[in-house]
Each structure stands twice: as C-alpha cells, then as structure tokens.
Image (cartoon, grey):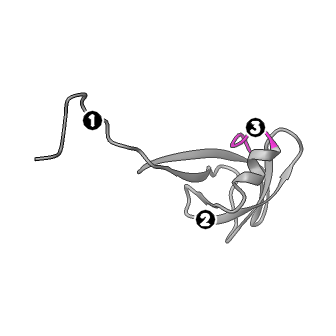
Amino acid sequence: LKRIILTGYPHKVHKSKAYVRYMFHNPEDVRWFQPLELWTKWGRRGKIREPVGTHGTMKCQFDAVVQQRDTICLSLWKRVFPKWAEGETFCN
C-alpha cells in the first residue's frame, strides 16, 4: 500500500470549527471525501461538515481548538502492484 497525504490550511478558525482551503478545487471532491477523517500536525482529529462556495473550501469540525498556524491533513491509501520482469516466472 502507498499512502498519499492531501494538505490544506485553515482560512477562518472559531474554536473547534474551521474553514479549510487549498485541499480540494471543487465542491464535488469535498463531498466525495466527506466520510474520511481529517488530522492536523498538532494532533487534532476532525471531519468534513460541508463544502462552502465553488472553489473547494470546506467547513470542518475538530475535537479540540484548532490554531490558525496548523496544517490540516487527509490520508489516502492506494494499492500498488509489484512490477515483474518480462521473462520472470514463479512456477517450478
């Protein structure tokens, strides 16, 4: 498995709620990734509430106070298959 991390930055913060920008580019992507869990570099956990506007900004809720200088992350996992050589066989 290969892990890919999408990052975004808080645009507006009010206690444990934040508007996050620069993670997605359109509201359809925000709705697609809505069930996944968000995490921050400072150890906060959260989730996506709803998309805001047309440029990929989203409203998020966290378990504790989020700071403006924090980075919001989203982990994605991709299955990666091994690359085999052309004449390589595994049968005896």
Q: Are marks 2 and 3 in contact (CB under 8 Å)?
A: no
Question: From the viewer's perspective, is 11 left or right of 37?
Answer: right
The image shows residue 77 at horizontal and vertical percentages of 50, 52
Q: Earlier in the sequence, mark 2 or mark 3?
A: 3
CA gap, disc 2 to disc 3? 23 Å
Q: Which one is in front, 85 or 7?
A: 85
The residue that mark 2 highlights is 44
Distance of label 2 from label 1 (alpha carbons):
41 Å
Which residue appears at 51% of the width and 45% of the height? 4
Q: Residues within 10 Å of mark 2 (few under 14, many from 20)?
A: some
The one of 87 and 6 positioned closer to us in this rendering: 87
Q: Residues within 10 Å of mark 1 (few under 14, many from 20)?
A: few
Q: Earlier in the sequence, mark 3 or mark 1?
A: 3
Q: Secondary structure at mark 2?
A: loop
- Total labels: the figure holds 3
Which residue, given by chain and number where applicable, does mark 1 sit on?
A: 84
Please identify, in this view, whether the residue under mark 3 or under mark 1 is nearer the observer: 1
Give the residue drawn at x 70%, y 63%: 47
Label 3 crowd (10 A; few <14 / some 14-19 / many >=20)? few
Helix, strand or loop at label 1? It is loop
- Residue under numbered circle 3: 25
Q: CA distance from mark 3 to mark 1?
A: 36 Å
- Magenta stretch, residue numbers: 21-26
Q: Nearer the viewer, residue 1 or 74?
A: 1
**Callout 3 amino acid:** His
**Where does the image place residue 45, in percent across and percent down from the top left?**
62, 66
Secondary structure found at label 3? loop
Query: Could you tell me if the residues under marks 3 and 1 are in contact, i.e. CB atoms within 8 Å?
Result: no
